[in-house]
Image (cartoon, rainbow, N blue to C red):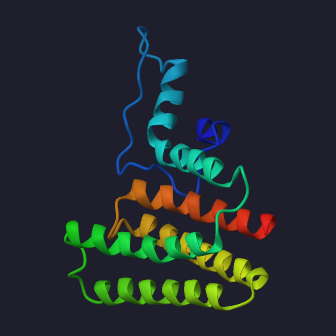
Amino acid sequence: MTDTIALGGHLMFGSAQDDKAPATAGRDGSETATSGVVVVLKHRWPTYLALALVVATFTDGLPALEFLAWLLVVMPVCYLIFGALRGELHGPGVLMLQAAGLLGFGVLALVALAVDHGLGWYVLAAGWLGHAAWDFAHHRTKNVVPRAWAEWCFVVDLLGAAAMIFMS
């Protein structure tokens, strides 16, 4: 657990994988110093990929409000696609919940585009924060999308929302 803290892992998520990888043992049977780092890096790859994307996206300033609003609609569509491909939309209420998420995030995107640009950034940031909570719930329940996707999307949404709030 301290390796996770030291390397910037997200404790609230646990592993991006469903199972923990076995530790690498040294010749004397003890865990090697690098094995903990390798395990953390292996399990945190969605977080590191998300961090790289956020830095690349927001380093030069905010992208257009319209582009980020469009992404707020595309993100739940990806969840529907994942759920359909994984056959996880057949449970009671699952498809309805995913459709409600798509509708809710779509409405927030439209409101962000309809109001004054200054206020629109805050509405859009609220939508992205809401989607981060959506990602967290999907990660914890292991439903609809792969856990690595939910972790990646959570980090992008959370940091993207923060960028919108502090850079707008």
Which residue is located at x 50 percent, y 61 percent?
153
- Image position, residue 28 (x, y; %): 43, 9
The one nearer the camera, 152 or 69, is 69
Indicate whether 15 appears above or below 6.
below
Which residue is located at x 54 percent, y 29 percent?
37
Which residue is located at x 51 percent, y 75 percent?
70
Indicate whether 105 appears above or below 128.
below
- Image position, residue 123 (x, y; %): 68, 83
Residue 113 sits in quarter: bottom right
Q: Say whether residue 145 is left or right of residue 156.
A: left
The one nearer the camera, 33 or 134, is 134
Q: Say whether residue 143 is left or right of residue 7.
A: left
Q: Can you say which quadrant of the picture contains the C terminus?
A: bottom right
Residue 145 sits in quarter: bottom left
The one nearer the camera, 31 or 11, is 11
Q: Residue furthest top?
A: 27
- Image position, residue 95 (x, y; %): 29, 85
Indicate whether 16 appears above or below 130.
above
Which residue is located at x 63 percent, y 37 percent?
7
Q: Can you say which quadrant of the picture contains the N terminus?
A: top right
- Image position, residue 157 (x, y; %): 58, 65
Residue 97 sits in quarter: bottom left
Q: How many marks?
A: 0
Indicate whether 73 appears above or below 27.
below
